[in-house]
Image: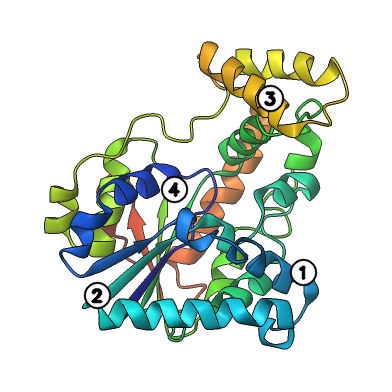
């Protein structure tokens, strides 16, 4: 059985990939590929397994209420094999960490190793390949904030906090965490590209170019962030009262997001953008130079292998 993990990162087109694969789920099964997206990975107690084990600092097998999740996942894995499936494609960005925590402390997936170690418990085999899309720090910070403010009331964007991204911990460290937990897995990393073609090209690496071509195009505007205009209105919305009813806030926030398209928020100065971009380019250079073993880089426009 081949196991492929696509672990995001957050705000890098994961939703579009997941929606496309879920829509063509039965078609994929006809070719021996089972797609396990968020609906599968977050069903029931599975939703809480990885964060609770990661934050609890111990294997789920030692937690009676969570050990059953491991057994359940292993049984499901075996059932897929018995049904003729020979490749399970898992796409779930929450296996890497919580993006709210990245925004809260300005550190990129600081506990990714713990989350990934908990993820490893869920599967009876090591992944053959792991896919990770990375994004430059400035646009990542803005996209995370513009998404989170649609989920809960927030204060203004904190540019000083977000300037910590890539300073003491960057994408190289995240990739190193992946390799540490899954030393025998091939790790494929590429840079975020907002085009729909980027999703299709990533899928071509995951399931093969012929199947990816027949799979079709991903949906437009999947997981779209709130515009700068919408963010302004959402700040006013959050300040208007005590939103104890989080669902009511989210419904109104979604209405505002959909009603106010436009340019994205631009909270960084030109000098800040230069610093953040330099950090990201340095991360990419280090990965290309082999800072982490077993990593294959792909250039986003073509998804070709990058020499180095």
Q: Going from the N terminus, do you reach mark 2 or mark 1 first?
A: 1
The residue indicated by pointer 1 is 55
| Residue 78 in the image: above or below residue 187 | below
Q: Going from the N terminus, do you reach mark 3 or mark 4 first?
A: 4
- The quadrant in which residue 204 appears is bottom left
Q: Is residue 127 visible?
A: no
Task: Give the mark toward the camera: 2 or 1.
Answer: 2
Q: Are the residues at dot 4 and dot 2 in contact (C-beta closer than 8 Å)?
A: no
Toward the viewer: 287 or 102? Answer: 102
Task: Name the secondary structure under disc 3.
Answer: loop
Q: Position of residue 85 (x, y in %)?
A: 24, 75
Q: Going from the N terminus, do you reach mark 4 or mark 2 first?
A: 4
Q: Is residue 299 visible?
A: yes
Task: Give the mark toward the camera: 2 or 3.
Answer: 2
Gap in angstroms between the C-alphas marked 2 and 1: 33 Å
Which numbered marker is on residue 267? 3
The residue indicated by pointer 2 is 85
């Amino acid at each position: 059985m081949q196991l492929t993990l696509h672990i995001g990162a957050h705000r890098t087109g994961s939703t579009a990939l997941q929606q496309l694969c879920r829509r063509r789920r039965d078609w994929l099964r006809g070719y021996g590929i089972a797609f396990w997206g968020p609906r599968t990975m977050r069903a029931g107690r599975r939703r809480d397994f990885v964060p609770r084990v990661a934050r609890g600092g111990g294997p789920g097998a030692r937690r009676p209420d969570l050990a059953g999740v491991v057994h359940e996942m292993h049984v499901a894995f075996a059932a897929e094999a018995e049904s003729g499936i020979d490749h399970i494609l898992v796409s779930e960005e929450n296996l890497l960490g919580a993006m709210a925590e990245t925004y809260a402390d300005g550190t990129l997936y600081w506990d990714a190793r713990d989350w990934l170690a908990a993820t490893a418990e869920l599967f009876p085999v090591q992944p053959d390949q792991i896919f990770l899309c990375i994004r430059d720090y400035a646009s990542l910070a803005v996209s995370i904030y513009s998404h989170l403010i649609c989920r809960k009331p927030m204060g203004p964007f904190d540019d000083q906090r977000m300037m910590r991204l890539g300073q003491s911990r960057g994408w190289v460290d995240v990739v190193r965490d992946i390799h540490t937990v899954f030393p025998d897995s091939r790790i494929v990393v590429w840079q975020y590209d907002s085009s729909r073609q980027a999703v299709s090209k990533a899928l071509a690496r995951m399931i093969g170019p012929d199947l990816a071509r027949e799979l079709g195009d991903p949906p437009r505007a999947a997981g779209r962030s709130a515009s700068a205009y919408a963010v302004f209105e959402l700040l006013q919305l959050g300040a208007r009262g005590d939103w104890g009813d989080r669902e009511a806030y989210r419904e109104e926030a979604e209405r505002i997001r959909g009603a106010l398209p436009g340019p994205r928020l631009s909270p960084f100065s030109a000098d800040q953008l230069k610093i953040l971009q330099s950090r990201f380019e340095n991360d990419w250079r280090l990965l290309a130079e082999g800072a982490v073993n077993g990593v294959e880089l792909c250039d986003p426009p073509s998804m070709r292998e990058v020499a180095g």
